[in-house]
Image (spheres, helix red, strand yellow):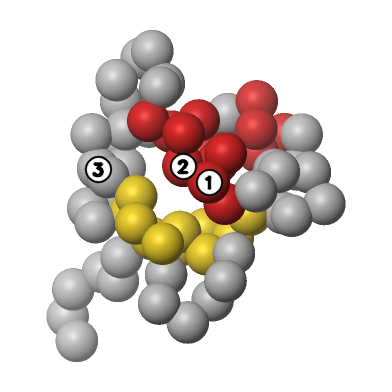
């Protein structure tokens, strides 16, 4: 209970799919996303990082275009 929870994001399916969003993070050239994403168990559009991401999610072009929310 004293640890930070894993970060979860939700894909906006009006703009992208969960699979496309996963591939966006996988091909990031800056290599700041050392944490891997995995689909959430219960939420059909959710993705969870297995460790805290190293970069700033809110500066990503995909975030600014509304492809996902935290």
Identity of the residue furthest to the left in this view? 2
Q: Mark 2 points at which residue?
A: 22
In the image, 41 versus 64, the foreground residue is 41
Q: In which quarter of the image is the N terminus?
A: bottom left
In the image, 25 versus 17, the foreground residue is 17
Q: Residue at (72%, 34%) from the top-left corner?
A: 64
Q: Return the disc, 3 or 1, that comes first in the chain's sequence.
A: 1
Q: Name the residue under label 3.
A: 35
The image position of residue 56, as x and y in percent, is 45, 34
Q: Return the disc, 2 or 3, that comes first in the chain's sequence.
A: 2
**Contact flag, marks 2 and 1 (Cβ < 8 Å):** yes
The image position of residue 32, as x and y in percent, is 30, 26
Q: Mark 1 points at which residue?
A: 19
**Residue 60, relative to residue 1: is it above or below?**
above
Which of the 4 image quadrants contains residue 54? top left
**Judging from the image, what secondary structure is the residue with disc 3 in?**
loop
User: Disc number at residue 4?
Assistant: none
């Amino acid at each position: 209970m004293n640890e930070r929870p894993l970060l979860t994001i939700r894909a906006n399916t009006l703009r992208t799919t969960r699979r496309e969003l996963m591939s966006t993070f996988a091909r990031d050239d800056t290599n700041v996303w050392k944490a891997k994403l995995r689909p959430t168990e219960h939420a059909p559009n959710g993705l969870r990082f297995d460790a805290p991401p190293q970069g700033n999610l809110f500066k990503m072009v995909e975030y600014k275009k509304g492809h996902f929310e935290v």
